[in-house]
């Protein structure tokens, strides 16, 4: 499996990066109107702060559903790459969705996990990843064989490039720090949905 | 509806109406009463059908598919519906996404599991509290009309809709000791 070559095998070995910085790095590599689903909380706020792409969808609630929503978009538009951006606390609520994604073997789907080991927006309580749960190992166990930790920023960019170029599904684990997000998403659900559908060419 | 075979079972009617409305994605958590419908959509290449680990996940997938241009429906039983209020209240309703849902009604008319009978009582109050359109189908001759009109309305008004399959229609799950 070339995907995981030169990437750390466990969470402990991955560099702690900054969420806004790597979100900007990811968005900068999106050249083909790829869809991005931002999970709730700071993951989504930093996606908003990284630029107003019409192909971005910002959840406001429904914690844990970024990956399922992304799977739905990917099913509907198999020619478009779709990325779910999700936090560690969120994906822990919906681990079964990783098995569903694996079962579908959805080629145009990638899940990026921003893991700082805390429920940061509610006051920094520890999540299970801080106590040893390894999301990349869980994803592999669920059947997403192309799952890897990003060793550092350069490795993250390389992994994003691979997911955009080759068939998935993919899961990229990112250890991040506890910095506050750079902005706050505008909470206007119908507008978010309408712009996203126009960005996908549906309307 | 004239050209279709007479004396169709409820699940055949549902399958045919979904096809006519281009509802091609079916996500579900299995249920015994839903089994013939699940088998029918798996057998028909028009549909993409698969099971999910949880009902919330199935709603998320159908929501994403709608935004990507594909219509879908979630199949579940009453206990599964009870896991959905947050997803309906924070995703389908505020984002104005016409998530179609079909619930096999347990908990009434001969239920043998007390947990099912208790959780079933939460379903309609939750739907009413969220002002989500819902219809309980009890007779074969009303199935086509209810689903046909309600899909049209859900899409036109960008609102979720729930179809409840009463044991009066399906026979329900029979007590077997």
Image (spheres, coloured by chain):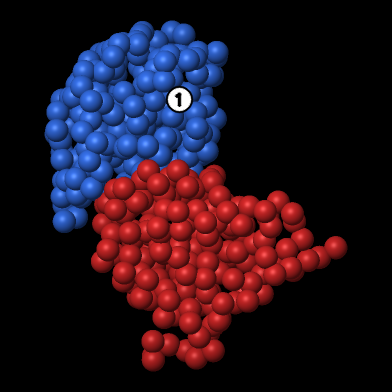
Quadrant of the rendered image containing residue B71: bottom left
Q: Position of residue B11 (x, y in %)?
A: 53, 74
Q: Quadrant of the C terminus of chain B?
A: bottom right
Position of residue A11 relative to residue A53, above or below, is above
Viewer-nearest residue: A147 or A111: A111
Q: Chain of mark 1?
A: A
- Residue drawn 70% across and 51% down? B115
Quadrant of the rendered image containing residue A152: top left
- Secondary element at tag 1: helix
Q: Please identify the residue farthest to the right as the structure is shown.
A: B177
Q: Quadrant of the N terminus of chain B?
A: bottom left
Q: Position of residue B141 (x, y in %)?
A: 50, 85
Viewer-nearest residue: A167 or B59: B59
Position of residue A157 relative to residue A38, above or below, is above
Q: Which chain is red?
A: B
Q: Position of residue B129 (x, y in %)?
A: 45, 54
Quadrant of the rendered image containing residue A62: top left
Q: Read off the residue under disc 1.
A: A89
Crowdedness near tag 1: few (<14), some (14–19) or many (≥20) residues, C-alpha within 10 Å: many
Is any part of residue B23 visible from this angle?
yes
- Residue drawn 50% across and 91% down? B6
**Image-based side of B162 in relation to B109, left or right:** left
- Residue drawn 37% across and 43% down? B90
Is any part of residue A4 visible from this angle?
no
Q: Position of residue A106 (x, y in %)?
A: 38, 44
**Image-based side of B114 in relation to A135, left or right:** right
Colour chain A is painted in: blue
Viewer-nearest residue: B22 or B146: B146
């Amino acid at each position: 499996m070339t995907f995981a070559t030169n990437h750390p095998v466990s969470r402990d070995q991955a560099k702690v990066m900054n969420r806004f910085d790597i979100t900007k790095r990811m968005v900068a590599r999106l050249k083909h109107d790829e869809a991005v689903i931002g999970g709730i909380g700071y993951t989504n706020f930093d996606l908003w702060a990284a630029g107003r792409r019409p192909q971005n969808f910002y959840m406001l609630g429904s914690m844990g559903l970024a990956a399922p929503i992304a799977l739905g978009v990917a099913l509907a538009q198999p020619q478009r790459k779709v990325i779910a951006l999700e936090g560690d606390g969120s994906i822990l609520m919906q681990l079964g969705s990783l098995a569903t994604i694996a079962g579908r073997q959805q080629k145009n789907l990638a899940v990026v996990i921003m893991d700082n080991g805390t429920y940061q927006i509610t006051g920094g309580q520890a999540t299970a990843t801080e106590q040893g749960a390894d999301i990349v190992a869980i994803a592999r166990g669920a059947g997403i064989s192309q799952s890897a930790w990003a060793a550092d920023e350069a490795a993250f960019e390389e992994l994003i490039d691979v997911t955009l170029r080759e068939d998935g599904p993919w899961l990229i684990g990112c250890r991040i720090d506890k910095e506050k997000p750079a902005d706050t998403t505008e909470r206007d659900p119908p507008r978010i949905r309408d712009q996203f559908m126009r960005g996908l060419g549906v309307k | 509806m004239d050209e279709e075979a007479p004396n169709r079972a409820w699940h055949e009617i549902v399958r045919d109406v979904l096809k006519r409305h281009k509802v091609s994605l079916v996500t579900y958590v299995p249920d015994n009463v839903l089994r013939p419908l699940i088998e029918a959509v798996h057998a028909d290449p028009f549909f993409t059908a698969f099971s999910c680990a949880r009902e919330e996940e199935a709603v998320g997938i159908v929501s994403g598919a709608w935004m990507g241009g594909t219509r879908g429906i979630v199949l579940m039983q009453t206990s599964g519906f009870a896991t959905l209020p947050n997803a309906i209240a924070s995703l389908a309703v505020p984002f104005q996404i016409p998530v179609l849902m079909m619930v096999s009604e347990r908990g009434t008319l001969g239920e043998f599991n007390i947990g099912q009978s208790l959780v079933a009582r939460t379903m309609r109050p939750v739907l009413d509290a969220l002002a989500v359109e819902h219809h309980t189908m009890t007779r074969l001759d009303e199935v086509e009309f209810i689903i046909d009109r309600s899909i049209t309305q859900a899409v036109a008004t960008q609102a979720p809709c729930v179809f409840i399959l009463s044991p009066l229609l399906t026979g329900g799950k029979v007590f077997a000791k």
